Image (tube, helix red, strand yellow):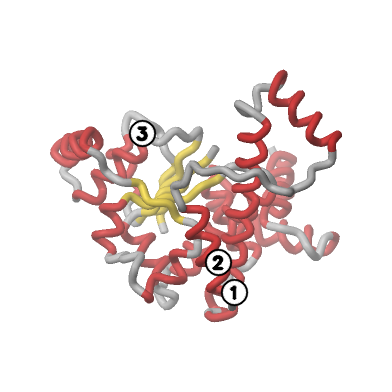
Amino acid sequence: MRTLVLDNEAVHALLDADHPKHRVVIAHFAGVVSRRRRGRTVTVVVPTAVRVEAGWDRSSPSSATANRFGVGDESLDAPSADQAARIRTAAQVSVADAHIGVVMQTLDADEIVVLTSDPGDMERVAAPKRVTAIRI
Amino acid sequence: MNIDDVLDEIRTLLGTKDDATVNTSMRLPSALRDAAALAVEHLDVAASTTVLTTAALRSAVETAVMGAALDAHYRWAPHARPTLVETALALAAQDGSPLAALPDRIEQAASEVLAYRPDADADDVLLWAEAQQAARV
């Protein structure tokens, strides 16, 4: 099972069809669909703190298209908020990136792939878990 | 209903947290039902045939919605449609393949595969590129 995680830049690129990275992100989604059609279990998730930072309000009409791409929300609960706080302090990253770290550390997936503008930060917040960080 | 409304309605239904179940009039070939029961009992594929069937059905519907959503997006924003090469490169990156940094190889593989299989998908291209790569070593 593979899970793709979106960071702030990836969400911006997804939401805006005129974003310079939009097509790159869409290519990853097309790849997900291709793999799923071949029977692989591949999901795409966004940490809710990333949605906040990127301004992805699912109830907004402007989000209608992105809402249809099958991106699941990963929310913070009390224990994961504690874990995110520790990651934020240790790695000196944003709240959204700390939430990404928690998601990557706790996801029950064999392979975790993160679409990001900063692979280095993503590998730091995911540690000790190994992830594939793709610069978009 | 237009396609966007259909996709929204399906996603809403898929996202509904509802433990209620229904007995459907869906008819399964009896041999398939028996095969599924054996797979559940001996191959550890799921907790029950109901779980197996539900998961497979959910996955198929989710995939169909994702694909239809992309197609609808391409109609509205044709410039957003990635090429076969771009999709193969994305998959190579997701796989952590060194081919992700070799777009020329992917492009070459795409042209070779498409000559034989005009309906090839990104995985066909990636597989051929990987085979060519292995042959070089």
Q: Secondary structure at mark 2?
A: helix
- In three-dimensional space, the C-alpha distance between marks 2 and 3, rounded to whole angstroms, equals 30 Å
Q: Is residue B92 above or below residue A110?
A: below
Name the spot of residue B91 as percent of width and height, x first.
58, 51
Residue shown at the point (42%, 38%) measured from the top left: A131
Q: Look at the image and tell me in which quarter the C terminus of chain A lies.
A: bottom left
Q: How many marks?
A: 3
Q: Which residue is mark 1?
A: B3
Disc 2 and disc 3 on one polypeptide chain: no
Q: Nearer the viewer, residue A22 or B130?
A: A22
- Please state the horizontal and vertical placement of residue A5, each as a whole percent of the image: 41, 49
> Do labels 1 and 2 touch, CB within 8 Å?
yes
How crowded pointer 1 is (Cα within 10 Å; few <14, some 14-19, many 20+) is rated as few
Cα distance, mark 1 to mark 2?
A: 6 Å
Instruction: Kindly tell me whether residue B97 is visible in this rendering.
Output: no
Would residue B119 be visible to someone looking at this image? Answer: yes
| Relative horizontal placement of residue B46, taking residue B131 as reference (left or right) | left
Which element carries disc 1, helix, strand or loop?
helix
Helix, strand or loop under label 3: helix
Quadrant of the snapshot with the N terminus of chain A: top right
| Kind of residue at disc 3 | Thr
Mark 1 and mark 2, same subunit? yes
Q: Chain of mark 2?
A: B
Q: Residue at horizontal 58%, vertical 42%?
A: A41
Q: Which residue is mark 2?
A: B7
Residue B43 at x, y = what percent? Answer: 70, 22
What residue is at 55 percent from the left and 66 percent from the top?
A: B7
Q: Amino acid at mark 1?
A: Ile
| Tag in front: 2 or 3 | 2
| Residue position for label 3 | A106
Q: Is residue B135 above or below residue A30?
A: above
Residue B76 lies left or right of residue A103; in this view the side is right
